[in-house]
Amino acid sequence: MIYLQLFYEFAKIGLFAIGGGLATLPFLYDLSARIPAWFGPEQITDMIAISESTPGPIAINMATYSGFTVGGFFGAICATVGVALPSVIITALIARALKQFKENRLVTSAFNGIRPAAMGMIAAAGWTVFRYTLLRLPINAETGHFLDVVNAPALLLTAVIFILASIFKKPHPAVWLAIAAIAGVILRMDGA
């Protein structure tokens, strides 16, 4: 039963996550609220880190990771097939039709409307990742000091990697991930 539920939940995510892998994040946060036994919002940041640092599309990687966490090997297969199947079917069905209608004003307008919505969903997911990664939540109202709220080591590491990656464009993203992982170990960034 868990395998069918994994397939169903991730097929819904795959069907409606327009805009790429990061567009799946709002759906994953919703899933974590509806079925908290599977994973919580905090684990989604771990999923993002692992999915971004492994080869392949982020949505597929996150589905595989989530499915494995919930249902082991077969759970990973069910979630992965579930998230990928809708786009495979839809792409196969509309590939020819899109060639005929790509110059159609209504089709162009629809795509122009979908793009900002997808960007908004990705930005909302980015804000959630920001809150769980760079802030210490929930915020204790009694202390409320800036340093009690901000995860200073994570914020510093984010700023350093952002600046270095902006200046030195040659290193592969895997290099930055490796540097961040080493810094996390050295700084003992255990999420506290």
Image: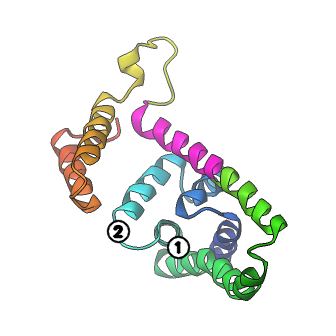
The answer to whether 167 appears left or right of 11 in the picture is: left
Question: Percent x, y for residue 128?
Answer: 54, 41
- How far across and down, in percent of the image, does residue 30 sit? 66, 52
State the image quarter where residue 28 is shown: bottom right
The amino acid sitting under disc 1 is: Gly
Residue 54: which disc?
Answer: 2
Q: Nearer the viewer, residue 90 or 63?
A: 90
> Which residue is depicted at the point 46% across and 80% down?
73
Q: Quadrant of the N terminus?
A: bottom right
User: Which stretch is magenta?
Assistant: 119-135
The percent coordinates of residue 116 (x first, y second) are 67, 50
Seen at 64% across and 46% down, the residue is 120
Q: Is residue 123 above or below residue 153?
A: below
Q: Nearer the viewer, residue 55 or 30?
A: 55
Q: Residue at x 69, y 85 (%)?
A: 95
Tell me: residue 57, above or below residue 38. below
56 versus 183 height, above or below: below
Is 123 in the magenta? yes
Real-space Cα separation, disc 2 to disc 1, in angstroms: 20 Å
Q: Nearer the viewer, residue 84 or 1?
A: 84
Instruction: Confirm whether the magenta stretch covers residue 29.
Output: no
- Quadrant where the C terminus sits is top left
Question: Which residue is label 1 attached to?
Answer: 71
Q: Residue furthest right?
A: 106
Mark identifier at residue 145: none
Label 1: state its secondary structure.
Answer: helix
Residue 159 lies, in percent from the top left, at: 30, 35
Label 2 vs label 1, nearer the camera = 2
Amino acid carrying label 2: it is Thr
Kindly report the secondary structure that dominates the magenta region of the rendered protein: helix
Residue 34, above or below 17: above
Element carrying mark 2? loop
